[in-house]
Amino acid sequence: MRMARRAVRRLGAFSTAGAWGGMLLALAWALVAPAAAWGYAAFTTGGDPTGFTDFINKPNDFPSWDKVTLTYKFDATFDAAWPNPAVKNQVRLAFEQWDTANATGQGATYSYGRANGWQDFGDIRSVAVHEIGHVLGLHHTDQASAANRNYRPSGGGLVVQAAVGNELMRSWINPGDYNHVLTNDELDGFARMYGHDLSFTEVPASSAADITIKAYTAGASNWANGGWSGYYRTGDHYQGVRITEGGISFNDSSSSPLGFKTLGLNWDYQNIGGQPTQSFRIRTRGTNNPTPLFHYDNQGGGGANRFDVYGATPLPGGLSVNFKDDLLHTWSSPHSGDIPASEIIHVGLEQDMWDWTVTSAVVHHPSGGETNAPLLSFHEWTNSIVTGTGLSGGAGGAAMEYGPIAMEVVARGLRIIGPESIASMLVSDLTLAPLGDRNLMLDQLNRGTLEQLIRDKQVFPVTEFGQRQMGPGDDFYLIFEGTPDTIPPEILKQGNYLFLDRPDLLNGELFVYAQSLAGDALVGNYGLLGVPVNGRLPEPATLCLLGLGAIGLLARWRRK
C-alpha cells in the first residue's frame, strides 16, 4: 500500500495595517545549555490518532529514506517565480545543512534562531531547512508537544518533552527572523531516524529526482509546504514507511515575499601608531555561508595596495563549535607588499543576512604584533507588540495549521553594535543620509560618497549623539519613530537610546557613517540600510558586474 503524508508550515502574513502572523521571539542569539530541554517529533505511519510517532511505545513508527544519496531539482515553476539565482542558492545552502547533519556536534548553543525585529519578507533559507526536515520525516515540534509526542534523549532512552518554542521544526516563523542552522532537537531527531550521512545532489530540471522543488499559489499567510510519499515496510504499519519521493513547494503569493535580505558594511582603517599592515581578519556572526555576495579588498588608489587574497572559513574546530554561524574573513597578500601605516585601508562585506554583525577584527603587522580594530555594525531595528491571539487549528497531526497571531510594529530605528573584542572605544561623528532609491553598491560606501553627500546637502549629522564610549558588544539605538512607552524596558533601563523623531529616514535607503577609535586603530564605519528584499521581482537595470578584485555578480535585486 502506498502512503503519502504532507506537512504544511503556516507562516505569517503582513498587512499595511501592521499585523502579521506568527509569534515574536523576544531574544536574539539565544544560548541554551545542553541540559536544557528540547525535543523532536516525526510523522506517524501506523495511524496514531495524534498524527505523530509514539517513539517510546512504537519506536519504528516513522518514515525515512533508505538511500544515502538523494537527488533534488528545481522545476520551471520555481525558476519562473524566483528568477534571481541568488535566491535559489539559499535553498541549496539549506540542503547543505542536512548534508552535514551527521557530522555536526551539538555543543552548548541550542538554537541559532534570531528575532532582531520585523522585516517584510520570509527568509527562504530558514523555511527551506524546515521543509527539508519534513521531507526527511520530521514533524512540527509545537504541535507534537500538544499531543505529548515530542521527545528528547534521556538516560539512554527517550522521555516526553514539551516544546521550548525556538525549535527549527516548530510550525511558524516571523517575517524577518532567521532559523537556518540545525538546532539540537533536529540533530537528535536525525540521529534517531538516520544515524548516518545523507548526501544531497542537485540534478537538472529535466532529470528524474528524489525531491522536487517548485512554486505554488496558496493563501497569503502561508509560505511553504513539504512532504513525502512512500511504501509501508511490512504488513505491520507501525514498522514505518520507506520514503521514495519528496517535494517542497514555496508559495509565490504570500503577502510577505519569500527571499532574503542582505547587509553591506564597509570600513576605513588606519593605524595612527605607525604600524604597517600585513593582513586583516574579521570575525562575523549571523550567517554560515562562506561566500559573501561581495567583498571589497582595498582596491582604491589604483589598487597597488589591494589584498590579492580573500577567504572566509568557519571557525577552527569545524561544525562542533558553539558558534556555527560565525565566519573568519581574512584579507592577506597585499599586492605591493606590506601596506604603509599612512594608507587608509578599505575593506567591506555584503552578506546574505540583514542583521549579521562583526564580533572581532584583528590587523596583523609585519612585526608579528596585532591591533584590534573597532569595527561597528549597523542594523535596522523594530519593536513590536502582540495585539491579539488569533490562533486556529485543525484536527489531527499533519493537517493541523496555525493561523496568525496579530502583532504591530510600534517603534522603528537604527541599531549600532560594537565588537565583542574591544574593551573600550570612542564613537563619534554619527551621520545619516537618506538616499531614496539611489541604489548604492558596496564599493560606494566610503569617504568619497560621504563627502559627495555633504556637498549635495543630503546628510543629517546626529549632533545629539556626540561622543560616546562603548564597551564589548555594546549597542545603541536611534529611535526614528516611537515613544518611550513603545521601547523595550531593557533598552530604557540601559539608557542606550536616543529619540530623533525622524520617520522620514525610514523611507528608502539610508547611508550611515560613524567614526570609532580604540588605541592605535581609527576606523570610519559605513553601512547601507533599507535595501529591498532579494525575492521574486528583480529590477534588471540594477543587476551589474563589478570589476573590483575578483569580478563578481552582486545579487542585490531591486523590487519593482
Image: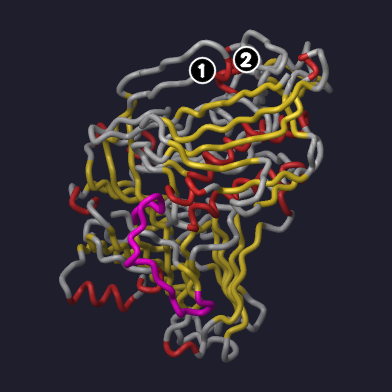
The answer to whether the residue labelled 1 contacts the one labelled 2, judged by CB atoms less than 8 Å apart, is yes
Q: Which residue is mark 2?
A: 51
Q: Amino acid at mark 1?
A: Met
Residue linked to disc 1: 400
- Classify 243 as above or below 433: above
Residue 266's quadrant in the figure? bottom left
Residue extending furthest toward the front: 206
What main secondary structure does the magenta stretch of the protein show? loop
Q: Residue at x 59, y 73 (%)?
A: 310
Residue 427 at x, y = what percent?
A: 37, 62
Label 1, residues with CA under 10 Å away: few <14, some 14-19, many ≥20:
some
Q: Is residue 128 above or below residue 154?
A: below
Q: Position of residue 242 (x, y in %)?
A: 76, 28
Tell me the tag on residue 496: none
Quadrant of the snapshot with the C terminus:
bottom left
- Label 2 sits on what residue type? Gly
Region in magenta: 530-551
Residue 372 in view here? yes
Q: Is residue 317 left or right of residue 472?
A: right
* Depth check, front residue: 93 or 231: 231
Residue at x 27% of width, y 39% of height: 411
From the viewer's perspective, tell me whether residue 41 is left or right of residue 549: right
Image position of 140 with respect to 533: above or below: above
